[in-house]
Image (cartoon, grey):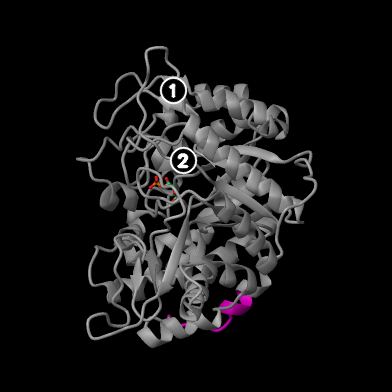
Amino acid sequence: METTSIRPFPEGFLWGASTSAFQAEGAAHEDGKGLSVMDVRVQDPSITNYEVASDHYHRFREDVALMKEMGLKAYRFSIAWTRIFPEGNGEVNQKGVDFYNELIDELVAANITPIVTIYHFEYPQGLIDQYGGWLDRRSIDDYVNYASFLFRTYGDRVKYWLTVNEQDHVVHMPFRIGLQKGDVKVTKKAGFLANHNMCVAAAKAIAACHEIVEGGKIGPAVCFDMMYPTSNKPEDGLAWLDAMDIRNYYVLDMNVHGEYNGVFRKYLEDRGWMPEIYPGDMELMKANKPDFVAFNYYASKSVSAYPTDDEHKMGEIVGDLLPETDPGVFRVVKNENLKATLWGWEIDDVGLEGVCRILWDRYRLPLLITECGFGNKETLPEDGMVKDDDRIDYLSRHIKAVQRSMNVGVPFIGFCAWSFMDIISGHSGFSKRYGFVFVNRDEHDLKDLKRYKKKSFGWYQKVIATNGASLDE
Ligand code: BG6
């Protein structure tokens, strides 16, 4: 809808940027850190050097100084579970505890609000070895014990907490829950069991946060792609509704409403994937709602109906990471109206406006964007400044989309761009860069890891300094 005016960003809007531990810190085997699934199952050393990442563990003071220079109001990062509890439970590793104390102190001294993700993909391998990790109910108590330790240790300074990063992706990726890639039907059943246990664990962590952290606010950080039906055929419209229910809403429906939505439940039951619900599970979720909905947004997807036939049977999902074809439900189709990144992610700021409105309409909780960014291949020019105009354009459009949604009543806590500096991509090594700050290394040649401000650094600095007004210049 066109409007005649647009409200400025409110005072106190959290202009932020994000990273995660395994992607930024490095020091993968230092100071007593234990192994996570990312260390042992996901990271292929032939792709890149993961052990050093961006060396944030050793250079965090320099990085926070850059954040301060940029004027960041918030920094969203994750704590590596296995730095705190190397085995996932049991003995605490004091050196890991100290590292995050120092990082948080540094942020607070720089007037930057820390937003902490409790668990960002790095599940302790120790818990997989002990009892199979998220597939066992013991995982719930170990997660809550770990989260409660964080609340007690850092809760005097950290008031924003994120329970699980992209649970909706994690459960579709066998290696992230400690399984080998195998029979899709087996791994999906396991994934949705893990999903249930994570929701119970998150509800308990929400309760613990509210009890332990004075003024603490906590919520999930899901990935939420905008979706569209590919045509005005009624069956494509219905496939879109189904895809929204079973791909986008299901985790938040459990976190916020304490329920399996009807389409998702039937989808799981028909395929034999419905996990056992223990007495009290859903009541626990209902009683412990998040304070906000945080989400990561990168792109949109278009779907059309995909009926089963002799060759494409129910449950025979195809898609390396996330289902791209799900017989009997939908298939993802290229959107010819949108440009895409080098990795095929369809760029769609209008879609972000839609997502903001959808999330507010369905959950009535304030929103926080924890990731949004443009991945690109970049090299350091002679003058030392990467001219990342495409990133500036992407971020500018997406931030304006947030503003448009706020203009029609969606309440927002803040916007955290992905990522503060170049870090290891979730799937594509170091060649896929997202940062405002260039980190001087290649996949295997670690060079000097020196930091260089990109053009977008100054651009975002101005956006923050003018509280968004410079976006209209
Ligand atoms: C999200 C993750 O899935 O997207 C991040 O929370 C990840 O960890 C980001 O880096 C971008 O994905 P990728 O694969 O481009 O790094």
Residue lying furthest top? 383
Q: Is residue 252 above or below residue 78?
A: below
What's drawn in magenta, residue-wise? Answer: 275-284
Residue 108 percent across, percent down from the top left = 65, 31
Q: Amino acid at mark 1?
A: Val
Q: Specify whether 40 is left or right of 373.
A: left
Report the number of numbered marks.
2
Q: Is residue 361 above or below residue 160?
A: below
Relative depth, front residue between 427 and 23: 427
Residue at numbered disc 2: 374
Residue 64 percent across, percent down from the top left = 55, 26
**Dot 2 or dot 1, earlier in sequence:** 2
Relative depth, front residue between 284 and 162: 162
Residue at numbered disc 1: 386
Q: CA distance from mark 2 to mark 1?
A: 14 Å
Q: Specify whether 101 is left or right of 345.
A: right
Residue 146 percent across, percent down from the top left = 51, 54
Residue at 57% of width from left, 72% of height from top? 254
Q: Is residue 182 above or below residue 370?
A: below
Q: Specify whether 399 is left or right of 185.
A: right
The quarter holding residue 336 reads: bottom left
Relative depth, front residue between 443 and 81: 443
Q: Is residue 340 above or below residue 185?
A: above
Crowd tier of the residue under label 1, counting other residues whose Cα lies within 10 Å: few below 14, some 14–19, many 20 or above: many
The disc at residue 469 is none
276 is within the stretch colored magenta: yes
Asked if the beta carbon under badge 2 is closer than 8 A to the nearest atom of ligand 1, the reply is no
